Image (spheres, rainbow, N blue to C red):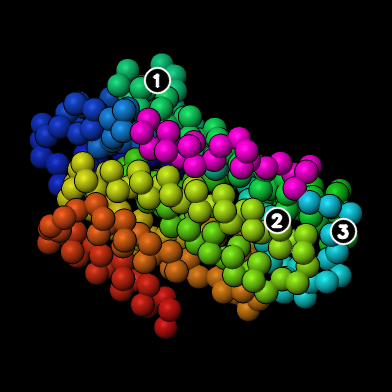
Amino acid sequence: MSGETRQPRAPGTEDGARGGMGVPEDARAATTPPGTAIGPMLEPFEVEESVTDFMRATPVSRRWDVESITSWDQADAGRLTDGQRSAVRFVTLIEDHLPGYFAMYHKLFPVNGDVERETYLHNRELYHFTVRWAAEEDTHARALTRYQTASGLTDPETLRAELAVEGQREFTLPYEHAVQYFAYTLVQEKATQIYYQQLRDVVEEPVLAEVLGRLSRDEARHFAFMADTVERYLRKHGDAVVEPVRDVIATFRMPLAGTMRGYWRWALKIADTARYDHTDAYEHLIRVVNRAVDAKSDRMDELTRFISSCRTVAAV
């Protein structure tokens, strides 16, 4: 994503070793267009299974839309503390960057003639999830912006201008391997879910509480898809994906942490309102690793110890 043309093999894979989808990993790396994710990957049918489970978790009867979820005329920012107001503004900026997130995934997993046929088949199955995920995340952005304007927190023109400042900045992550993007999003979605739950618990304004509850439930489903996908990677590819996953934790930052002006100061401020610590999600990643393998290798053991130590250090 940085513009460099780097095509390394997956760590732990020998010359000529086979990556995902029956293609030699070194051959896949050599033919992968710059800026797209490299293997090892899952087989298309494995992605389809994960996508199907995700879709089944949200039948039409459980979906929601901004227009009908609540009585927006009852929204009242006057019932929020200054910290809660700040938190709403902060998470709206994060959610509204959806076009940047979606563009990154579309670039990483293209569905066009730039990739080999088997890679296309993998990416096409994943696209079924990505478009649903994007639609739901865009609904989150719309719900939060509607809350801000309906509650009197801000006016539409001011809010649009504020969102455009961040929205026009490109979103990238410093990874190459497909599994890294799923591991990153696993942590990000779970951390977001936890924060929405924490914020909802301290908010006494019922409209915002309703919105946060719905967002939290959606993020839990998004996490479940990513957890299932990462678990499949660990079961299928074992030690070959340990270092890529470890690198995600070693370098993890929440979305926009590197581009939003004053991000860290703002993040600390909203943490005073409701606990905000992305490392709360690490224990859930450890559970995924533990479920994936019956007898962990030394490298798997080291991975779980490393993830745990990062949580401990961050919590001190």
Q: Is residue 307 within the magenta segment? A: no
Residue holding disc 1: 114
Say if mark 2 contacts mark 3, CB within 8 Å.
no
Of 171 and 150, which appears nearest the observer? 150
CA–CA distance between discs 2 and 1?
Answer: 40 Å
CA–CA distance between discs 2 and 3?
Answer: 13 Å
Label 1 SS? loop
Asked if residue 283 lies left or right of residue 207, the reply is: left
The residue mark sitting in front, 3 or 1, is 3
Residue 246 position within the rendered picture, expressed as x and y whole percent measured from the top left: 29, 58
Label 2 is placed on what type of residue? Val
Residue holding disc 3: 74
Is there any visible trace of residue 26 in the rendered image?
no
Looking at the rendering, the stretch of residues picked out in magenta corresponds to 48-69
Q: Which residue is drawn at 23% across and 32% down?
A: 20
**Outermost residue, bottom direction?**
316
Label 3 is placed on what type of residue? Gln
User: Of marks 2 and 3, which one's residue comes earlier in the chain?
Assistant: 3
The quarter of the rendered structure image containing the C terminus is bottom left
